[in-house]
C-alpha cells in the first residue's frame, strides 16, 4: 500500500513558467514533509520541507503548500529553469517517530528552453 | 558541509555472490539509512539504524542484512546476490528524531548477472 503517492510520473513545462508537482498521502499521522530533487547518477538533494503546523513554506523560487484536510501537498517552482529538470520526490514522516521517511515514486520534470 | 560517501559508484556481481556496500558519513549523525531506487517504485527503505549496533527493518529487508559497528559507517550486505537485486542503492544519514532532512550519498549502481 503506497502511503505517499505522486500520480504524475512526468511533467513538461516551458522555461519561465510555473511548475507544479503534486503529492498525496494517506496516513494522517504524517506531520513532516520534504521535497527532494534528484539528477541522474547522483543522490537526492534536499529542497524544502514543511511541518503540519504550517500550510505554506517558501524558499526562493520554491514554495511548498500543505492541505492537511485533503492530505495533499504541492511544490511550486517559479520561474522554472532548465536546470530544474530532474526527478522530484516527496517524502513524509512522523516527528519524533521511528526516523523513517516514506518516499513517493517521483515525478520527472523537464523544463523546456 | 555534510558528506555521505559510498564505496563504489558501479558494481557488477554474479548471482550467489556475497556483496558488501559501504557508506560513511562525516557529520556525526545518529541515523543512517539504506534505500534502493527502482523505476516507477521510488525510494524504498531496506534498513535503518538510529545508533551504533542498532538496526531496524525497513519496508523491503528480505535478502539483505546490515552492520553498524561505528557511528560513521553503515554497511549493507547482500548475503547471496540475485538478479532481482539489480538496482541503484542509496545511503543516507540524518540527525535527530524523525524530522530534518536526510543527506544522501551518490548511490551505487549494482548489476547482478
Image (spheres, helix red, strand yellow):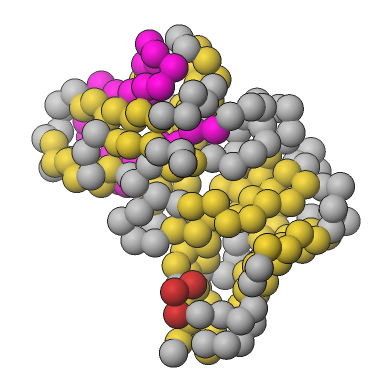
Q: Left or right of A79: which side holds A64?
A: right
Magenta residues span: B67-94
Residue B76 visible (yes or no): no
Image quarter where the C terminus of chain A lies is bottom left
Q: Is residue B54 above or below residue B30?
A: above
Q: In which quarter of the view is residue B92 placed? A: top left
- Residue B6 counted in the magenta span: no
- Residue B72 counted in the magenta span: yes
- Residue B14 rendering spot, x and y as whole percentages: 11, 35
Write the residue at 34% across / 41% down.
B89
Q: Main secondary structure of the magenta part?
A: strand
Write the residue at 39% across / 57% down.
B39
Q: In which quarter of the view is residue A79 placed? A: bottom right
Q: Is residue A93 above or below residue A55?
A: above
Q: Is residue A88 above or below residue A100?
A: below
Q: Left or right of B38: which side holds B52?
A: right
- Residue B100 rendering spot, x and y as whole percentages: 64, 39
Depth order, front residue of A79/B85: A79
Amino acid at each position: 500500500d503506497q502511503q505517499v503517492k505522486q500520480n504524475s510520473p512526468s511533467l513538461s513545462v516551458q522555461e519561465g513558467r510555473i511548475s507544479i508537482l503534486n503529492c498525496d498521502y494517506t496516513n494522517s499521522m504524517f506531520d513532516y514533509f520534504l521535497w527532494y530533487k534528484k539528477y541522474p547518477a547522483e543522490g537526492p538533494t534536499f529542497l524544502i520541507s514543511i511541518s503540519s503546523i504550517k500550510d505554506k513554506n517558501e524558499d526562493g523560487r520554491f514554495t511548498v503548500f500543505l492541505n492537511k484536510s485533503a492530505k495533499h501537498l504541492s511544490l511550486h517552482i517559479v520561474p522554472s529553469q532548465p536546470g530544474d529538470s530532474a526527478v522530484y520526490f516527496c517524502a513524509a514522516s512522523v516527528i519524533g517517530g521511528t526516523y523513517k521517511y516514506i518516499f513517493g515514486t517521483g515525478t520527472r520534470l523537464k523544463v523546456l528552453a | 558541509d555534510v558528506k555521505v560517501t559510498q564505496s563504489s559508484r558501479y558494481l557488477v556481481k554474479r548471482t550467489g555472490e556475497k556483496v558488501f556496500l559501504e557508506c560513511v558519513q562525516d557529520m556525526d549523525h545518529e541515523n543512517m539509512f539504506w534505500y534502493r531506487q527502482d523505476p516507477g517504485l521510488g525510494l524504498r527503505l531496506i534498513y535503518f539504524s538510529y545508533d551504533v549496533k542498532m538496526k531496524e527493518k525497513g519496508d523491503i529487508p528480505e535478502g539483505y542484512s546490515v552492520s553498524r559497528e561505528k557511528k560513521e559507517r553503515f554497511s549493507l550486505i547482500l548475503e547471496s546476490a540475485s538478479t532481482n537485486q539489480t538496482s541503484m542503492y542509496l545511503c543516507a544519514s540524518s540527525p535527530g528524531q524523525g524530522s530534518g532532512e536526510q543527506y544522501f550519498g551518490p548511490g551505487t549502481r549494482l548489476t547482478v548477472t
